[in-house]
Amino acid sequence: MRIRLIVLAAMACVVVACGEKKVSPVEEAITKKIAEQLGDLDNIYFSSLALVDSTTFGEEVARRRNTLEARYKQNLKLARDYESAGKLRNEAKKREDAANDQQRLEGLAALEQRLAENDSLNVVEVYIYKFSGKARNYKGTVTIDNMYVSITPDNEVVAMDYKKEGVLKSTGHLIPGYSSLFE
C-alpha cells in the first residue's frame, strides 16, 4: 500500500510538472516591461507571440545614415530658401544644423568601419516580436492586440509600439558610440 501511494504521488508530480507552462526569456522580458508601465501585475497571458523580424548592426547603421542624409539635405534646402528670402539668422542656423549633420555622418562612417573591423555588421542588434495577450493588475485587465516589441539578444526590451517602425526608432543607441555623435 505504501509503495502504491509513493508511485501515485510520483505520477501526480510528473503530471503537474508536464502541465506547467514554461515561460520563455522573451515572455519574461515583455512581462517585466509591461509591469514597469502598468505597475504590479497579477498575471499576464500571451495569446500569441511570434518572431517577425530582426535587425543587424549593419542594417541599423544604414537606417541611421539614411535619416541623417535626409536631415542634411533638408537643412541645406531650408538654408537656401532662407537665404533667398533674406532671413539671414535662419539661414545661419540651418547651415549650422547641416554642418552638424555632416559631422555626424562622418562619425557614423567611422563607427561603421569599426563594426566592420570587428566583424559585427552582421550581428543581430534586436529581434522584433509581435504579440497579443491580456495583462491584469489591481486596476483591471488590459488587452494588448498586435503589439510589436524589439528585444536585444540578451533579452532586454528596447521598445514596444503598435507599429513595427515604432520599435526601431530608439535602436540607434545600441550601436556602440552612436549616442556620443549627438553630444
Image (cartoon, rainbow, N blue to C red):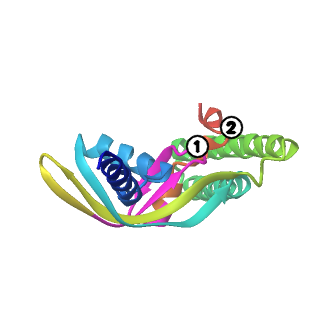
Q: Position of residue 159 (x, y in %)?
A: 45, 50
- Report the magenta residues as a range: 144-165
Q: Is residue 37 part of the magenta span, yes or no?
A: no
Q: Residues within 10 Å of mark 2 (few under 14, many from 20)?
A: few
Is 46 above or below relative to 121?
A: below
Q: Nearer the viewer, mark 2 or mark 1?
A: 1
Given the current orientation, which residue lies at the most extreme left position?
A: 139
Given the current orientation, which residue lies at the most extreme right position?
A: 117
Q: Quadrant of the C terminus?
A: top right
Q: Residues within 10 Å of mark 1 (few under 14, many from 20)?
A: few
Q: Is residue 75 visible?
A: no
- The tag on residue 176 is 2
Residue at the spot of label 1: 154
Q: Quadrant of residue 182?
A: top right
Q: Nearer the viewer, residue 88 or 146?
A: 146
Element at label 1: loop
Q: Quadrant of residue 131?
A: bottom left
Q: Position of residue 67 (x, y in %)?
A: 62, 57
Q: Position of residue 53 (x, y in %)?
A: 59, 66
Q: Quadrant of residue 178?
A: top right
Given the current orientation, which residue lies at the most extreme front position?
A: 1
Residue at left offset 65%, top offset 36%: 181
Q: Is residue 1 left or right of residue 82?
A: left
Residue at left offset 47%, top offset 52%: 24
Element at label 2: loop
